[in-house]
Amino acid sequence: MSGLTFAAYLRDATRAHGALPADLIQTLETTADACCQISAALKRGALAGILGQAGSSNIQGEDQKKLDVISNDILLDAHVRGGHLAGMASEEMDDPFPIPEGQAQGRFLLLFDPLDGSSNIDINVSVGTIFSVLEAPAGSDAAEVAPFLQPGTAQVAAGYAVYGPSTQLVLTLGHGVDSFTLDPDSGDFVLTQEGMTIPAETQEFAINMSNQRFWEQPVQHYVGELLAGKTGKRGKDFNMRWVAAMVADVHRILTRGGVFLYPLDTKTFAKGGKLRLMYEANPMSWLVEQAGGAASTGRERILDIAPNGLHQRVPVILGSRAEVERVVDYHREI
Ligand code: AFP
């Protein structure tokens, strides 16, 4: 199947796994097109005068970069014209965005983090777009928050684009994880890896070590064991990587294994964690599980969480199954 364009792949997925609804196919194709546009904007960077702060902040109180706002607008505009969605929700917007009256409507809901890791933009390091697709409950109103508040197990598609040396799109429809590379000549995403799998064991971990003094005891204990290396209980040396863009860190784990932790700590305790359930944790957790890994808050499976708000935050521990299970055990035992 390698070499298929994204559109041909979606037609093939229909043949292999039963018909994908036409409006879901359109949702995914339009999202891929929008990612292609975001990729082009990122490539122009300073030449287009689009680096730096936008002078606004999002609902989380975080300063927005110009490219956060531009990427959000690209996704909104593409999908308003598309005619296949009931509504959208974004990390960068306070409220849901229903498809305006007078525009064609569909039955799906799209949730996205338009530009994850945006602090990396100004230093020319990888960033990404994360998305999750849900079906709107019959008779629901996409101007309301309620239809969006579905657990991660209800996702019908999830994926991300990582804007690195090449632009890659990684997708799950619930039958494994496949990866596409943007062909800059044709503007098509082309299937380049089928069935991404995360090895159960690893020697690599990702965590922001500067937060160590704020962590809970189970995570202190786990990371302490990793740092002890060959001379400690684990009997092997571990390497550490931290890109500060979840997309890039998860992409590395999907590609060569590892474990990623943004655990609960005393700094983020009142908010419930750092990462957003609907825009980051749910889509990434589904991708990781579909690749044979695991994803937990330390205390529960992320995909089982019943959301209580559009911008809810949760602790995230995901990646190689054996490592995630060990951290979960420590949360039970320590
Ligand atoms: P933004 O999407 O607001 O740039 O946040 C990125 C992020 O949520 C996630 O992608 C990173 O893993 C994490 O923040 C990095 O956090 P630190 O700043 O604590 O390293």
Image (tube, rainbow, N blue to C red):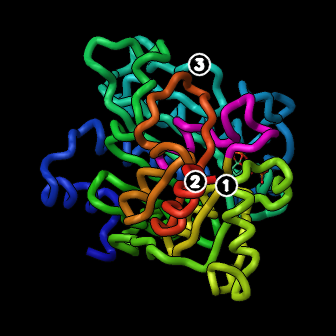
Residue that mark 1 sits on? 218
- Within 10 Å of disc 3 (Cα), the crowding (few <14, some 14-19, many 20+) is some
Please indicate, yes or no, whether residue 40 appears anywhere in the rendered image.
no
Q: Earlier in the sequence, mark 2 or mark 1?
A: 1
Looking at the image, do the residues carrying marks 2 and 1 touch, with CB atoms under 8 Å apart?
Answer: yes
Indicate the position of residue 288 as horizontal and vertical percent values: 45, 59
Which residue is found at the position 53% from the left and 63% from the top?
Answer: 326
Which residue is found at the position 59% from the left and 18% from the top?
Answer: 95
Name the amino acid type tagged 3.
Asp
Which residue is found at the position 32% from the left and 30% from the top?
Answer: 135
Instruction: Residue at the far front: name it.
Output: 333
Q: Earlier in the sequence, mark 1 or mark 3?
A: 3
Name the amino acid type tagged 1.
Pro
Residue that mark 2 sits on? 333
Q: In the picture, residue 186 is in which quadrant? A: bottom left
Q: Earlier in the sequence, mark 2 or mark 3?
A: 3
Residue that mark 3 sits on? 95
Residue 104 shown left or right of residue 144 in the figure: left
